[in-house]
Image (cartoon, grey):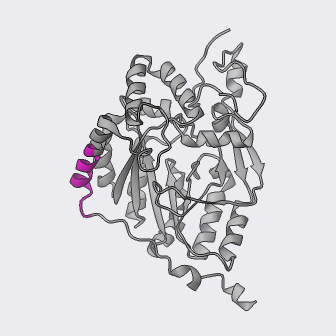
Amino acid sequence: MKDQYIYGRGAQINPDNPFDTNSYGNKGLIWDDDDEIQAHKKTEYIRVYPKTILTKVDSPDIGISYSMNPYQGCEHGCVYCYARNTHTYWGYSAGIEFEQKILVKESAPEILEKKLKSKKWKPAPIMFSGNTDCYQPGEKKYRLTRRMLEILWRYRHPVGLITKNALINRDIDILTDLAKESLVHVAISITSFDEEVRRRLEPRTSSGAKRIQIVEKLSNAGIPVTVIFAPIIPSINDSEVFDIAKASADAGAVRMHHTIVRLNGAVAEIFQDWLRKNYPDRYDRVIHQIESCHGGKLNDSRFGTRMRGEGNYAKIISQQLKLAKEKYFSGRVMPQYNLSLYSKYRDRQLELF
């Protein structure tokens, strides 16, 4: 038997689902032959039909009212992703299955439109990708994000998007229309310009250089863009603060945010396994520095501190970001969402009834 690395996947294990009485048993995934390895490289798309698509966001750390995710699970395979824990609610593992078994919410556009038609609905910014990336590879086939954007534009409803995939360029036409009416904000997440790090950390995402090109293309089209340097991982990508800030500003980004990595639930086990296999020489240092940001723990669910961390290391990072913003983003302002157009441009046919 042999212990192999599954290239093309971020997670290398399938931790047990806490809601499942069955155990995966061999969490180390030691395989007898390459056929078993190849099986875990294949992605399976599973159609589901939820009753709702909008989730009320109560966290003061996010700064938006609602989120929606047309896909559950994410093929990008970011090993640190906090959304991995939500896959267990659907009966899957937060590990390889999170990036291998993608649930496609095929009725999402119809559910969204029904909500926007409701007499009780009051316009408030809705954010794509509060959980999983709306432009992950499956979007090229299913086009759920595109269809939902068309509905939002029809009703002149404000929307935000977060992605790390160049597929967003496909929808630049409708995003431009939304931007002209101050109805859209786009955030591009960048983790590293080091391709070796990016391929190990986020195996099926667009490269850092490509993401900067996305920022430039969207900005040139008049679409306001925020760059999110996230997550900052000690001794992995924390040396790139000023490089990413300068490149983002040069490409036209309006502002820049950051988060410190936190490893809640099964993500801790997945990340620790990944770290041992990819950077064994840095393992102790990385883990101890992460713990120093979260009160001696790897996980942190406290509002106000969970995203930015605390302690000396987190303070140093925050100071670096402050300097970078002052140097590269001074005077730039993100336009406010226009909430006044929704009722004015509502589906006119409804007024006939």
* Place of residue 114 in the rendered image (x, y in percent of width and height, measured from the top left): 71, 71
Q: Residue at x 26, y 50 (%)?
A: 322
Q: Is residue 22 magenta?
A: no
> Is the C terminus in the top left, top right, bottom left or bottom right quadrant?
bottom right
The residue located at (66%, 77%) in the rendering is 120
Residue 193's x, y, as percent?
37, 38
Q: Where 262 falls versus 337 (above or below)?
A: above
How far across and down, in percent of the image, does residue 176 sit?
Answer: 48, 68
Quarter containing the N terminus: top right
Prevalent SS, magenta region: helix
**190 left or right, relative to 43:** left
Compared to residue 302, the image places residue 237 above or below, namely above
In the rendered image of this protein, does residue 202 appear above or below residue 57?
A: above
In this view, the residue in front, 7 or 312, is 312
Give the x, y percent position of residue 88: 69, 39
Image point (62%, 39%), residue name: 85
For the question of whether residue 160 can be seen, the reply is yes
The residue closer to the viewer here, 260 or 31, is 260
Mark yes or no: residue 253 visible.
no
Residue 279: which quarter of the image? Answer: top left
Residue found at the far top of this picture = 1
324 part of magenta stretch:
yes
Quadrant position of residue 58: bottom right
Left or right of 36 on screen, residue 329: left
Q: Which residues, given as a range, are shown in magenta?
A: 319-331
| Residue at image location 55% in from the left, 41% down from the top | 82
How many dots with numbers? Answer: 0
